[in-house]
Structure formats: C-alpha cells, structure tokens
Amino acid sequence: MRRKRFQKGSLQTRTHGRHRVWVAFWWEDGIRRCKTLGRHSQMTKAEAEGVLSAILQTVNSGVAHTTRAVYTFEQFTEDVYLPFCRRSWKESTAGTSEQIVRRHLIPKLGMSLLHGVRREELQDLLDGKASDLSSSVVAHLRWFLNGIFKLALSDGLVLSNPAAELRIPRKCQPGRTMRPLTEQEVAKYLGVFYLRERLIARLAIFEGLRPGEILALRWKALEGDTIRVEERVYKRVLDTPKNGKTREGAISDGTLSLIVEWAGLAEEPSPDGFVFPSETLKTPLSLDNLWRRCMQPKLESVGLDWASFQVLRKTNASLSQKAGVDPKVASDQRGHGLGVSMEVYTSSDLEQKRAAVKKLEAAVLRKPQPEDQVASANLA
C-alpha cells in the first residue's frame, strides 16, 4: 500500500456569527476534515498553527486515533507550564509567581481534568477570591490562568481557552495604599541617616534605582556624574537588571558629593569592588539586614518606617513629574516603560490638582464666550 503523503493542512479565517475565527482544514481517511480552533481576536496565527500541528501529528504518523495525553490542571501546571516559564522568568519573578499559582490556583483546580475546565468554573474561582484579595492579585490570577490555558491550547490539549474572556470582579478587597513622600518628608527621611544609608536612600529617591541595583553597584560603574546599571542582586544572587538591559543614568550633584565622601572610606576601592559590600567585602550588602537593622529603626523615630524602597521609587516618579521632568526621560532613568511609569509609579498630589483646575479655569474664562460676543455687538 502506498504510503500517505505528509500533509501540513491549511489555516483560514472565516466569519462565524459576529466573530472571525480560525478554521483548520486537512485530509483524513480520504475525507476532508475541518475544525474551528478559536476566535481570531483571541488567538494569534502562530497559536492556531500550533493547534493544527498537534492535530496533524497523529494523522501524519499513520495512527489517526492515537490516545491524546490527559493532564489534570496540577500536572500540566507543575510539569509543563511552570518549567516552560522558568526559562524566561528571573528568580524574583519565579519566586512570587509560583507562590501565587500554588497557593491560589492549584488547591482549587488541581484535580480537575485540564480539558474539562469551563469558563464558568474559572470565573467562580475569581469571584470567590475577590472576597479576600485585592483587584491587583485577582488580576494576576486571571493572567496566570490565561497563560496556562493558552499553552495547553498550543499543545493541542484543549479545544479552546476558557480563561480568555475572564473578568475581574468589581468588588475586590482594597489593596495596600502607598503614597509617595512629600518634599518635606524627603528631607526628614534623609536627615535621620548616617553617610552610607543616606547615600543609598538618595540613589533610590533622586537617581530612581531599585534596591537590588543599588546594592549590586561596583566602583567601576561610577564614572563622573554617570552611573551604569549592569547588575542587580536578589536574595544574594547577582543577575542582570530586571528588564535584562544595561542602562546609563545620571547622578545628581548632592548624591555625587556623598559618593566622593563614601569612596574615601571604602575598604575595597578596586574597580570590581562593591560600593556597599558586606562584612566579607566579597558580596553585596544584604537588603533585608540593611532595612531591618539600619534603616527601619531610625525611620520609626520620625514616623516614616512605612516608606519602603517601593515608596522611594514611587516618590522618584511622582516628584519628577511634579518638577516638570519629561516623563520619557524619567522612565529611562528608572529603567522601565513609560506606561508603567505613568500608571503605576506616578501620582499627583493635591497641590498639583489645585494648580490644574485653576489653570483650566483661567484658560476657559480668559476667552470670551459666544454669548458675551453677541451682547458686546448689540451694545455697540
């Protein structure tokens, strides 16, 4: 019997009701087969091709009815999804992400067969979590569910992605409020520290560096009024910066004078030496020890112990915006995208809002209104 020709199938977009969908076509047992793979708006062409490839794998192998692998949600997440994501996740991302998945998703869905999970079941899960979690955490859960089922869809293990259209419940728990420091609070914040901690705080507030980037600094990264961010440290492990890119930033005059003063006291001033070394001089200072032993106790005395490094980063973004710094320049200095800068880190204080409404009022009332122009003409 002549061996059947290897086939790639074909992929087309068709209109189904009000939606465009991906439709796969192939031949099997002499019959033209077709299958709707999913909506065009929810599935890329590459994902659709992956599903088609999985369908044709059994056809091209000559065993048209080979049993498809069956996973529970927990098996697929632990054996396929998390190992695949670890290839690109940094250690800090992996640590928090895996904890969220294992704590909130696997206990609820772990024993469910992957191909049997329905959208209503996932939405009920999110609705239930909303009573205990903030909208930010619930949004992360939705993101992970979508990622898990998108990967399963690309492997041909499910026929559609039940997490694609999930909604964040309206009534979630309020998240932790976090406001930036005011100008007066910045002065008080810096005033309680000695040289080392003051320099570290300034690098966060004025230069916009992350704490891991500050503690991973080496002397060779400081040249004049320029700073090169090439490394960061997380749980004593050195790695590339969060977005994987080296960047150059500027140093303010006040910070530069403290760097010169601190350099004169450095015990390891070689180019590869850490600017803020541990007692061994071979590793960076521990962030947990720095905060718990040296910074938090002093800040408690002035009521600012709530102002963590995350608050300092928000302070940098908000005060930069208030000072009129170009948003793109400020976000490049901090090392993240403009959207994250404006939506997450930047907030306006009441003084700026008052100035905004007064500016709008002055702009509107400065121009004669049409009714006033008519009245003036009649009087003339």
Image (cartoon, rainbow, N blue to C red):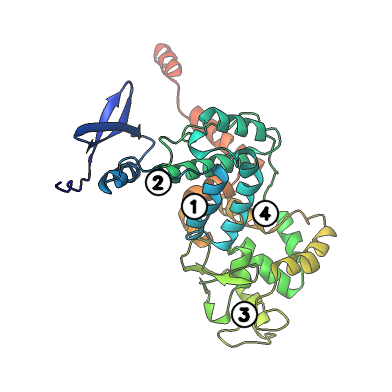
> Which structural element holds mark 1?
helix
Disc 1 target residue: 80
Disc 2 target residue: 155
Task: Give the distance between the C-alpha atoms of the residues marked 1 and 3, in whole angstroms.
Answer: 39 Å
Q: Earlier in the sequence, mark 2 or mark 3?
A: 2
Q: Is residue 367 left or right of residue 295?
A: left
Disc 3 target residue: 274
Task: Give the distance between the C-alpha atoms of the residues marked 1 and 4, in whole angstroms.
Answer: 36 Å
Q: Is residue 251 left or right of residue 30?
A: right
User: Quadrant location of residue 34?
Assistant: top left
- Residue 336 is situated, as x and y percent measured from the top left of the image, at 50, 56
Front residue of 167 and 215: 167
Residue at 59%, 88% (x, y): give it.
270
Three-letter code for the amino acid on which mark 3 is drawn: Phe
Residue at 69%, 35% (x, y): give it.
173
Q: Earlier in the sequence, mark 1 or mark 3?
A: 1
User: Quadrant location of residue 138?
Assistant: top right
Front residue of 250 and 287: 287
> Which structural element holds mark 3?
loop
Label 4 environment density (alpha carbons within 10 Å; few <14, some 14–19, many ≥20) = some
Label 1 environment density (alpha carbons within 10 Å; few <14, some 14–19, many ≥20) = some
Disc 4 target residue: 311
> Which structural element holds mark 2?
loop
Three-letter code for the amino acid on which mark 4 is drawn: Val
CB under 8 Å between discs 1 and 4: no
Q: Earlier in the sequence, mark 4 or mark 2?
A: 2
| Dot in front, 4 or 2 | 2
Three-letter code for the amino acid on which mark 1 is drawn: Val
CB under 8 Å between discs 1 and 2: yes
Q: Earlier in the sequence, mark 4 or mark 3?
A: 3
Q: Quadrant of the C terminus?
A: top left
